[in-house]
Amino acid sequence: MRITRRLEFDAGHRIPDHASQCRHLHGHRYALEITLSGEIIRADGQPANGMVVDFGEVKAIAKRHVVDIWDHAFLAYRGDTAIVGFLQSLPGHKTVILDVVPTAENLAVEAFRILDPLYTGVFHNQVRLEQVRLYETPNCWADALRTDLA
């Protein structure tokens, strides 16, 4: 069985080598979808009976380790030194420095790498992270799949 939980956050970024408008500072209303696989729990009288994992637990982990960190932050590539220096000069500015250019593709992979050890094998029914989908806009997204990252 597969289940998916969606969370949203706002963040700024830029793609420094982009040939068009994305090379400028701008932001998005991102959506992050976390897809897990596992067996349905069959345990009468238990709170998780009939579930793979409680969606609240899925949300709490993703929120704490990705969404709260990236939300209302500027996601900056470490190699984009002019922007990184500028952002670090702003007192109290929320900047997340990444080792990759913050494209939808790279952010999906980064979220997968962060979340994978937090979900996979942690729950008693051997839940496994299968996919992270990151929407940059309602019409554009990237999927980081376990099968592609293994």
Image: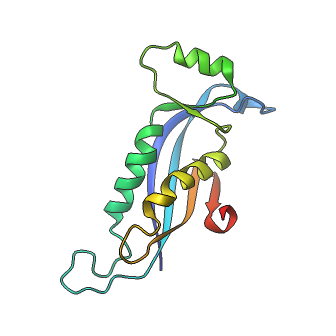
Quadrant for residue 144, please give it: bottom right
Query: Which residue occupies the foreground of this view, 88 or 55?
Result: 88
31 up-or-down from 25: above or below: below
State the residue at coordinates (33%, 61%): 57
Report how many numbered discs are placed on residues in the image: 0
Residue at point 58% right, 48% down? 110
Say which residue appears at 60% left-offset and 51% top-offset.
108
- Seen at 60% across and 32% down, the residue is 13
Say if 113 sits above or below 39 in the image: above
Residue with the most extreme right position? 19
- In this rendering, does residue 62 appear at all? yes
**Measured from the top left, where is residue 105 in percent x and y?**
67, 49
Q: Is residue 74 left or right of residue 72?
A: right
Q: Is 4 on the left-hand or right-hand side of 105?
A: left
Q: Quadrant of residue 77?
A: top right
Q: Is residue 137 something one can see in this rendering? A: no
Task: Name the quadrant of the C terminus.
Answer: bottom right
Between residues 38 and 141, which one lies in front from this camera angle? 38
For residue 70, side relative to residue 83 (left or right): left
Colour scheme of the rendered structure: rainbow
Q: Is residue 63 above or below residue 96?
A: below
Given the current orientation, which residue lies at the most extreme left position? Answer: 45
Q: Position of residue 68 (x, y in %)?
A: 40, 41
Percent of width and height locating residue 138: 58, 50
Q: Nearer the viewer, residue 11 or 87?
A: 87
